[in-house]
Image: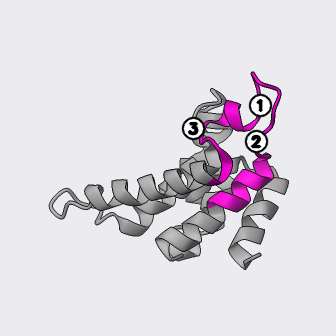
Amino acid sequence: MTERVQKALENHKKGMNCAQAVACAFADAVGMDEATLFKVSEGFGAGMGGMKCTCGAVSGAILLAGLKNSSGTPENPTKARTYQLSKEITNTFEKMNGSVICRELKGVETKKVLRTCDGCIEDAAKIAEAILGL
């Protein structure tokens, strides 16, 4: 397990939500301080603000895709490539776990857990490292 993956898991144990845990583990790699990443990723936890939609860990990794790839200005468009990276992250995670939807991963309706939060965080962090080169 890499240092960043371990950091993401430790972040979760400290009380960060899944999106925060993943995003904050890469703060130095994307040139943003951890406190700001903590704030901007807070609403993505528990499947987008507790709605159990897109997995927070996946959302954290996608947030990193924008930070890694975006030019930061509409004059130099980069969103097509960021979308491509985001799609790669999402597709890879879904192939590994059978879903990217929090309630499905947690087995809310089926009572069959596909992946724990720690497992989702580990996978999303590994995917961010691989796809984004972080």
Q: Which residue position holds label 2?
A: 114
Q: Answer with left or right where residue 25 lies relative to residue 32.
A: right
Residue depicted at 68% across the width and 60% down the height? 123
1 or 3: tag closer to the N-terminus: 3
SS at badge 1: loop
Residue depicted at 75% across the width and 21% down the height? 109
Question: Can the viewer see residue 39 in this picture?
Answer: no
**Mark 2 to mark 1 CA distance (whole Å):** 7 Å
Q: Amino acid at mark 1?
A: Gly
Callout 3: few (<14), some (14-19), or many (20+) C-alpha neighbours within 10 Å?
Answer: many
Q: Which residue position holds label 1?
A: 107
Q: Is residue 117 magenta?
A: yes
Q: Amino acid at mark 3?
A: Thr
Comparing 95 with 32, the one in front is: 95
In this picture the colour scheme is: one colour
Q: Which residue position holds label 3?
A: 54
**Mark 2 to mark 3 CA distance (whole Å):** 14 Å
Mark 2 touches mark 1? (CB < 8 Å): yes
Give the quarter of the image for residue 128: bottom right
Query: What is the span of residues highlighted in magenta in the rendered image?
Result: 96-124
**Mark 1 to mark 3 CA distance (whole Å):** 14 Å
